[in-house]
Amino acid sequence: MIKHPITIAGLLLAMFAVVGVGLVAVTHQATKDQIAENERMALLNSLNALVPASSIDNDIVNDKTVVSDIDKLGTKETTVYFGRKAESPVAAVFTSIAPDGYSGQIKLLVAVLADGSLGGVRVVAHKETPGLGDKIEVEKGDWIHSFQGKSLKDPKPAKWKVKRDGGIFDQFSGATITPRAIVKAVKNTLLYYDENKKSLFLAKKQAPAKEQMAEAAKTESGK
Amino acid sequence: MSDITYRQLIRDGLWNNNAALVALLGLCPLLAVTNTAINGLGLGIATTVVLVLSNITVSLIRNIVRNEIRLPVFVLVIASFVTAVELSMNAWFFELYKILGIFIPLIVTNCAIIGRAEAFASKNNLVKSTVDGLAMGIGFTLVLVALGAMREFIGMGTLFTQAHLMFGEAARGLTFSMGDNFQGALLAILPPGAFIALGLMLAMKNWIDQRNEERAKQAALEEEPEAAA
């Protein structure tokens, strides 16, 4: 039987696809642990910058829950990491989003200490103008440190604004929108914390139970 | 084509037929990531690795692959290598990987790579294809680094910031800075700055080439009367 040229071509192409996928699979196997470790370390480093490792004794990266309050936290699903020492709450780190930056969302880490004051704020990702709005990055300016120690009591909620709007936070020359968006997002996160602090730290203890139940339900339906 | 010398190959890759300056291929990453010299270097090295690997592979399989499935096979080869490089960078150069972001996967669509596979590696032997890939890749990298350095210096007054992301902590000393008071020209960092800087580089290359040509002509003219006499 003489094979049609198109069959040979097809087989050849399939062969190359198999070899290509094989190469990718091998690389994936060789690198996946390192990549997962990199991501865990990167997260741990940014969390530890806000909640010092010495102040907690739990595994903050895995002690987390997902909450939902689109008005205050900026997205439908906000991950919250908990720092605890001897089982008592030390801090909650919110992955809040300021939705109204100059060019799109500004992703934040907002650490709220158990007493309601701020352990610190960091900008994780943003698309603000280089040279103007990007002074919110910790590498490019001290501005983001101005949140440290602030709470809803100090300053009063009405003063949680940039100076131009009658508040206490500096704006940058040429860029008011960016700081305004962040100040608002941080204030909203504090408000959320204030309303939910009682239930928030208990969330972790409920979450695994829920997951187990969900998994149990899955295996049930699988049968 | 097959009697091309290695000297010519290298000269083509670095200057005469430079992927970025003459062929104007792969401009998307070229313009997008070159806001610092180290970003340019990182992407340049990643591109060079893919270019060499794809040239080697394409040259090895050039007699097996039927003409009609040539392009899909090339694309497959390139895409596989890019994915492997992307995963490796994610594992071992995590910080740099985060900065370059989307532009590593986009190496797949760098026309310089499939261009060399189609125009050179599919017609030449293994050694020549390897040298060609290396020369083209280095030529591309040099342009990326030069463009990055130019924009970084004018825009931020620094050179080789974040060198430690690539070469480890010891390389922090490489970083050069004009000091905190340097007011950079913001334009250089923004996308228009990339176009302007690339335009200047193209103009400079053409100017040098023209001058060399004129000199060669002049030299030829001066020699001629002597030869006649």
Image (tube, rainbow, N blue to C red):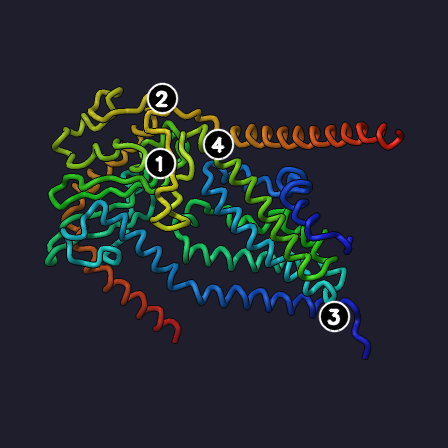
Q: Secondary structure at mark 2?
A: loop
Graded by Cα atoms within 10 Å as few (under 14), some (14 to 19) or many (20 or more), the crowding at tag 2 reads: few
Q: Nearer the viewer, mark 3 or mark 1?
A: 3
Q: Which mark is residue B70?
A: none
Q: Where residue A74 sits in the image (x, y, percent)?
A: 32, 40
Image depth: mark 4 or mark 1 in front: 4
Numbered mark located on residue A174 in the image: 2
Q: Is residue A116 left or right of residue A187?
A: left
Type of amino acid under label 3: Ile
Crowding at mark 3 (Cα within 10 Å: few <14, some 14-19, many 20+): few
* Label 2 to label 1: alpha-carbon separation: 20 Å
| Residue type, label 1 | Pro
Q: Are marks 4 and 2 on the same chain?
A: no
Task: Pick whichever of labels 3 and 1 is earlier in the sequence.
Answer: 3
**Both marks 2 and 1 on one chain:** yes
- Which residue is identified by label 1? A99
Q: CA distance from mark 3 to mark 4?
A: 51 Å
Indicate the amino acid at tag 4.
Arg
State the residue position of label 3. Answer: A8
